Image (tube, helix red, strand yellow):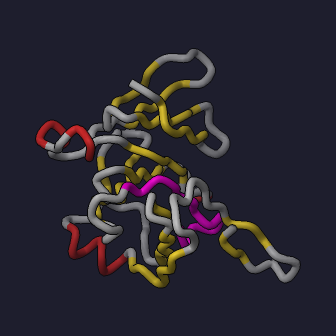
């Protein structure tokens, strides 16, 4: 399978790779050994064109053990790098037939941006997320709220990132 994205855990020798087969794999960077395969719930029953995991990013600071994945099924998932457990599974509402292909987490874990293959960017408020597993999608939607959406381009947005301006505020680029 093709690897579509990678992220390195802050201050730890752990790398996560995501691929078109729908898996997120955690690796020990120092020895190159596979630690875990993280497979989304119901993965085997999804159509092949909805399995790809397109992007991955780690949270930082106290939540650096949590990584986020997005992909072709338009779900956002948060995983524990320690256990491989899916802590959050939440539908993003990106348009049917489009894939969520880019992801960026604001360095203080206050916000996150997702972008899709139709050119839309969504911003999410993460400030209430503590790193604990959430029971269901309703609880996730209450804690991880969409705060903005706009069409940034007429075609796919392949990358988003948070940058600091001269006043210390963070913006999406």
Q: Residue at x 15, y 45 (%)?
A: 42
How far across and down, in percent of the image, does residue 86 sit? 30, 49
Image quarter of residue 61: bottom right
Look at the image and give the residue range highlighted in magenta.
99-113
Looking at the image, residue 138 sits to the left or right of residue 94; the answer is left
The answer to whether residue 138 is left or right of residue 29 is left
Image coordinates for residue 11, horizontal then vertical, percent? 67, 42
Q: Residue at x 32, y 68 (%)?
A: 95
Q: Quadrant where the C terminus lies?
A: bottom right
**Does 77 sit above or below residue 123?**
above
Does the stretch in magenta take in 105? yes
Q: Would you say residue 140 sits in the magenta stretch? A: no
Residue at screen point 50% across, 27% down: 27
Q: Main secondary structure of the magenta part?
A: strand
**Residue lying furthest front in this view?**
154
Position of residue 108 measured from the top left corner of the image (x, y, whole percent): 63, 68
């Amino acid at each position: 399978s093709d690897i579509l994205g990678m992220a390195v855990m802050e201050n730890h020798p752990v790398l996560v790779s995501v691929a078109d087969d729908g898996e997120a794999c955690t690796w020990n960077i120092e020895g190159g050994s596979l630690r875990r395969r993280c497979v989304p719930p119901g993965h085997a029953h999804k159509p092949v064109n909805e399995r790809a995991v397109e992007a991955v990013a780690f949270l930082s600071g106290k939540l650096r053990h949590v990584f986020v994945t997005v992909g072709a099924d338009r779900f956002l998932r948060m995983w524990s790098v320690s256990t491989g457990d899916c802590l959050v599974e939440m539908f993003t509402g990106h348009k049917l037939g489009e894939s969520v292909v880019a992801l960026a987490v604001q360095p203080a874990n206050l916000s996150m941006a997702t972008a899709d293959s139709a050119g839309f960017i969504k911003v999410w408020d993460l400030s209430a997320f503590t790193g604990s597993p959430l029971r269901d999608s309703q609880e996730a939607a209450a804690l991880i709220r969409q705060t903005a959406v706009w069409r940034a381009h007429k075609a796919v947005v392949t990358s988003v990132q948070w940058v600091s301006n001269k006043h210390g505020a963070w913006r999406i680029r």
